[in-house]
Amino acid sequence: MSEDIHALSGAYAVDALDDVERARFERHLAGCTACQAEVESLVAAASELSVLTEAAPPASLRAKVLAEIATVRPLPPLTAPQHDSADEDATSSTPPEPVQAPAATAAPATQVEHADDLTERRRSRSARGLARGWRVVVAAATVAVLAIGGFTVWKQIDKDPSRAIADQVLAAPDATRYGARLAGGATATVVRSNALQKAVIVTSGMSQPPSGKVFQLWLQDATGHMTSAGLMPGGGDQVVVLSGDASHSKGAGITVEPEGGSDQPTSDPVAFIAFA
Amino acid sequence: MDPMSRFSVVPSGDESPEGPARPVSLEQLLRRAATGDETAFAELYDAVSSRLFGLVRRVVRDPAQSEEVTQEVFLEIWRHSARFDPSKGGALSWMLTIAHRKAVDRVRSAEAARHRDEGYGASNQDVTHDSTAEAVVERLDAERVHRALETLTPVQRQALELAYLSGYTHTEVATMLDLPLGTAKTRIRDGLIRLRDTLGVTL
């Protein structure tokens, strides 16, 4: 499997992976120093291509940029390894449940990619439903996880005890994807393996929850009842295992809840991903 | 110092080009920006805005959206300036990575897709050259990259251009180039490795 995933380094370096592939590759990257070095060098090589596309922006952009940055405080440097405690909180609130390793954990790329067309259509359908039905509160402000800055993120993922489960689900031969696009360009994709009875949510470009609030995950059963599937950190790109058996669920939702989470959703979902 | 850490990538072995030298490196400007130095950031903007905007516009194509994305890119650079890690690569490469990711995110969002040019134009770019010494250096850089691209196989080159300059996923690239599923990613990687080795990119 690692040989297969190693081959994604080039596509990763030029942002040519979709969210789920990127999540899988970044998890691999966390523990593969050879890939880290290769990605760094390939990113630098790709950057050289930009000399071919050079073009001066409209003169008015300069003033806009400088006016905008004057109102924003630069983030402090990352000083200690314990920088994002939210991740660890979320991890401990979604205790990993043992999952039987499938006989073959290798993900034939074709199987995962095969689902793309369908999911693409489902995604646009669920995105429309979302815009119609729910108040979307995910703010436009995105915290992009940077390919280069991402090295700090990979280190956190490395310590995540639910990592093995997420890896198995993402690589499962029966992995099926369901996606939704949120306001502000954020995306949420649920990858479910019925064989493993687990689902993993992969988000990209998520905002932080409002102060004093948390993002909570839910699994919806056939009757429409929502069961908590744990908490999820906000910000950037996340890969979180939904706790509970997802194999019979009809959909997954994300809500904003008071700190510590709720027994039942107390607000409209910021995202709902139907498994259909 | 690696070549990416200066604004103008000068072919290795060259003496400094004609014209005004750039006494302050992009790394230094970033470091000053991280302390809230707006003047340093303005200087940084002047040094890299053509590179960043040009790449964003190549991927996004729509002029108004390209401008919007570029503005977001500079805000992101400003906010994250303290988190730039020179041990992971040069400052220009880091900023271009931010620009590329944001441009790609924009074109992949469903809303933007509707406004986007469907067609894939060839790789000829309208590089705006003026007659300054800096422009001469830029043209030399462009020629160097063009030459390096010529060492790639046609499929490697097309795959890399569709992925990097047009922002398509490797799965989309495979379909567009009629390649068996899963092979576009290999072409992209092989092409990048050859480009890297031909250009002598070091970190």
Image (cartoon, coloured by chain):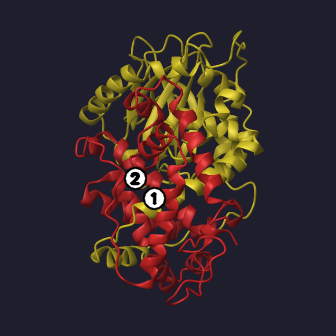
Q: Colour of chain B?
A: red
Observer-nearest of B169 and B18: B18
Tell which of B83 and A230 is nearer to you. Answer: B83
Q: Which element is circle 1 on? A: helix
Marks 2 & 1, CB-CB < 8 Å contact: yes
Against B119, residue A109 (above or below) is above
Image quarter where the C terminus of chain B lies is bottom right
Locate residue B172, reporting x and y percent.
41, 32
- Which shade is chain A? yellow
Q: Which residue is mark 2?
A: B103
Judge from the rendering whether residue B120 lies leftward or rightward of residue B92; answer left or right.
Answer: left
Measured from the top left, where is residue B67 in percent x and y? 31, 64
Determine the residue positioned at 27% across, 29% down: A129
Using the image, tell me which numbered label, if any, was put on residue B74.
none
Q: Is residue A44 left or right of residue B164?
A: right
Which amino acid, mark 2?
Ala
Q: Residue tagged by mark 1? A: B99
Q: Position of residue B99 (x, y in %)?
A: 45, 59
